[in-house]
Image (cartoon, rainbow, N blue to C red):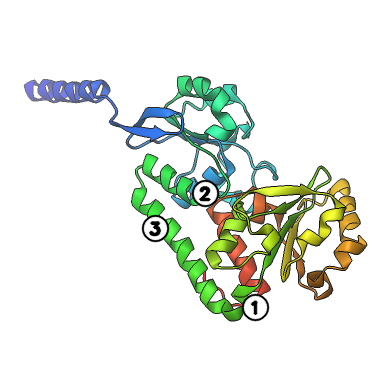
Amino acid sequence: MLKTVFAGTRIAVAAALLLSTPVMAREITHAMGVTDVPDNPQRVVILTNEGTEALLYLGVVPVGAAQSWSGDPWYDHIAAPLADTVPLGTELAVNLEILATLEPDLILGTKVRQESIYPQLSAIAPTVMTETIGGEWQENLKFYADVLGKGAEGEAAVAGFADRTKKIHDALGDAVNEEISMVRFSPNRTRIYYKDTFSGLALSQIGFKRPAAQDKDEFATEVTKERIPEMEGDRIFYFSDDLNSDEAATNLNDWLNDPLWLNLEAVKAGKAQRVSEIIWNTAGGIYAAHLMLDDIEKIYGLASTR
């Protein structure tokens, strides 16, 4: 009987100690300041598309995430592992009420999208933010990895992508000297994309050149049809709405049948190719980046480096 009492006492004391011991935390400096985050977060929310891909690549399935820009609610290439993840609205319109019900122990976001709701997010759970998104996806992935206590995995992920781009560079031979033009056709605005874009930085990392008019460390410029000649390159990659809505399809057809477009040397040579807007532009994460490299390999007839 006495032994049973002592055993029960030990269990009760151990339980009390567990309840009274604070969760270990680290100070993380980020775009919005300094925040204490738990060492081993179990219920993570991510509020960027690129961040969702980063977490999945690191083996972390978020309990909630900003939904994909296209998809219902996720891009096809990441839908399966997100089957139980709760969509929280878009990056620009996060549903704070639903987010709060998830009881997260860590929220990851970006200042460029969610600066205005940072106080509300921080009231729900420790919140850390990157400065921006887009071309910075590799630095952001390493940042997320550090916050999650997976710094080595983050470094390995970025190194693996760099290794693929080097192998593709070497396999391309003289073709790597092609000047690549990047164009996005949209009913709202058509843009020529420069180097400081998701796809532009990947092309630069491979070693491709850009036409003189596009060789700028900037994002993009909006153009009218009169500026179609500025789209010229040895090869043109262009994208439009992958869902091919009637409006987008009509707009794309209008541009692609313009005499100025048809007169471009790359178009006449059959080197103007449509690629996925989701993969080359909007998804913005590591899975999309590798899928973009897959496209490059197929277009140039290279062996897979996967």
Label 3 CA crowd tier, 10 Å (few <14, some 14–19, many 20+): few
Residue denoted by label 1: 301
* Residue type, numbered disc 2: Trp
Q: Is residue 37 left or right of residue 129?
A: left
Which residue is painted at 55% across and 36% down in the image?
A: 47
Looking at the rendered image, the quarter that the N terminus falls into is: top left
At x 61%, y 74%, the residue is 177
Mark drawn on residue 158: none
| Residue 8 rendering spot, x and y as whole percentages | 16, 22
Residue 42 vertical position relative to residue 126 in the rendered view, above or below: below
Quadrant of the rendered image containing residue 235:
bottom right
Per the image, the residue denoted by label 2 is 137
Which residue, given by chain and number where applicable, does mark 3 sit on? 156
Q: Furthest-front residue in view?
A: 212
Report x, y in % for residue 148.
38, 41
For label 2, the SS is: helix
- Who comes first in sequence, dot 1 or dot 2? 2
How far apart are labels 3 and 2 at the CA level? 14 Å
* Residue 169 figure quarter: bottom right
* Marked residue nearer the N-terminal end (3 or 2): 2
Task: Tell me: residue 26, above or below residue 274.
Answer: above
Query: How busy is the neighbourhood of tag 1: few (under 14 within 10 Å), some, or many (20 plus)?
Result: few
Q: CA distance from mark 3 to mark 1?
A: 27 Å
Please, what is the three-letter code of the amino acid marked with disc 1?
Gly
Q: Secondary structure at mark 1?
A: loop
Between marks 1 and 2, how big is the CA–CA gap? 27 Å
